[in-house]
Image: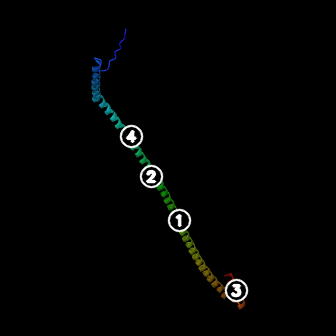
């Protein structure tokens, strides 16, 4: 017996041509339904997610730039603070030097005044001592003259007594 194999082409089978058409119609209808109800929301979700990711990346970039700016500003402030501190220290050192010089100058001036006053006082004391010495010398001379007059001495004796008194003075 002979075996017969029937191979039907798409258009050969009585139900095959309709099947392809129905497949395409169902596929188109399903595609339309998916496009209308599923792909739209899926695409919106993907676009929304993409936008959120882009915004997050932009925010991260802005935050990085702000951080860099803050770090730069911080470094500038630290450098300025260090500079200001050095200036303050230098000014304080200069002020201390000036105060030191002023104190030394004032001490020297006061020492000069004390030396001047001491010298003046010494001169005054010397003047007073000289006056007292003259007074005592005069008193002594009067006393000696009185003794000489009260004693009637000869010339030789008077001369010896005068020399003795002069040597004592």
Give percent across and percent down for residue 168: 68, 81
* Secondary structure category for the residue under label 3: helix
Q: Which sits in the foreground, 105 or 42?
A: 42
* Secondary structure category for the residue under label 2: helix
**Mark 4 or mark 3, which is nearer the start of the sequence?**
4
Q: In 3D space, how far apart are the residues under numbered discs 4 and 2 (Cα atoms)?
A: 28 Å
Q: Which sits in the foreground, 87 or 167?
A: 87
Q: Is residue 145 above or below residue 99?
A: below
Q: Which class describes the residues within 10 Å of circle 1: few (<14), some (14-19), or many (20+)?
A: few
Q: In 3D space, how far apart are the residues under numbered discs 3 and 4 (Cα atoms)?
A: 126 Å
Query: Mark 4 and 1 residues: CB-CB less than 8 Å, in contact?
Result: no
The mark found on residue 163 in the picture is 3
Q: Which residue is mark 4?
A: 57
Q: In 3D space, how far apart are the residues under numbered discs 1 and 2 (Cα atoms)?
A: 37 Å
**Mark 1 or mark 3, which is nearer the start of the sequence?**
1
The mark found on residue 130 in the picture is none
Q: Which class describes the residues within 10 Å of circle 3: few (<14), some (14-19), or many (20+)?
A: few
Q: Is residue 116 above or below residue 54?
A: below
Q: Which sits in the foreground, 15 or 108?
A: 15
* Secondary structure category for the residue under label 4: helix
The mark found on residue 76 in the picture is 2
Give percent across and percent down for residue 72: 44, 49
Q: Which residue is mark 1?
A: 101
Q: In 3D space, how far apart are the residues under numbered discs 3 and 1 (Cα atoms)?
A: 61 Å
* Secondary structure category for the residue under label 1: helix
Which-is-in-front pick, marks 2 and 3? 2
Query: Mark 2 and 3 residues: CB-CB less than 8 Å, in contact?
Result: no
Residue 161 in the figure: left or right of residue 33: right
Give percent across and percent down for residue 76: 45, 52
Residue 31 in the figure: left or right of residue 152: left
**Mark 1 or mark 4, which is nearer the start of the sequence?**
4
């Amino acid at each position: 017996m002979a075996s017969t194999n029937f191979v039907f082409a798409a258009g050969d089978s009585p139900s095959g041509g309709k099947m392809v058409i129905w497949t395409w119609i169902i596929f188109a209808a399903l595609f339309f339904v998916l496009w209308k109800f599923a792909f739209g929301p899926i695409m919106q979700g993907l676009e929304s997610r993409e936008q959120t990711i882009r915004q997050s990346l932009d925010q991260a970039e802005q935050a990085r730039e702000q951080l860099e700016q803050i770090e730069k500003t911080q470094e500038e402030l630290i450098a300025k603070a260090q500079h200001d501190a050095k200036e303050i220290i230098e000014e304080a050192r200069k002020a201390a030097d000036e105060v030191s010089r002023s104190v030394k100058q004032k001490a020297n001036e006061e020492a000069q005044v004390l030396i001047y006053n001491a010298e003046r006082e010494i001169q005054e004391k010397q003047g007073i001592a000289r006056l007292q010495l003259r007074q005592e010398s005069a008193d002594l001379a009067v006393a000696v003259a009185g003794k000489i007059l009260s004693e009637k001495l000869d010339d030789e004796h008077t001369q010896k007594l005068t020399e003795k008194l002069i040597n004592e003075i």
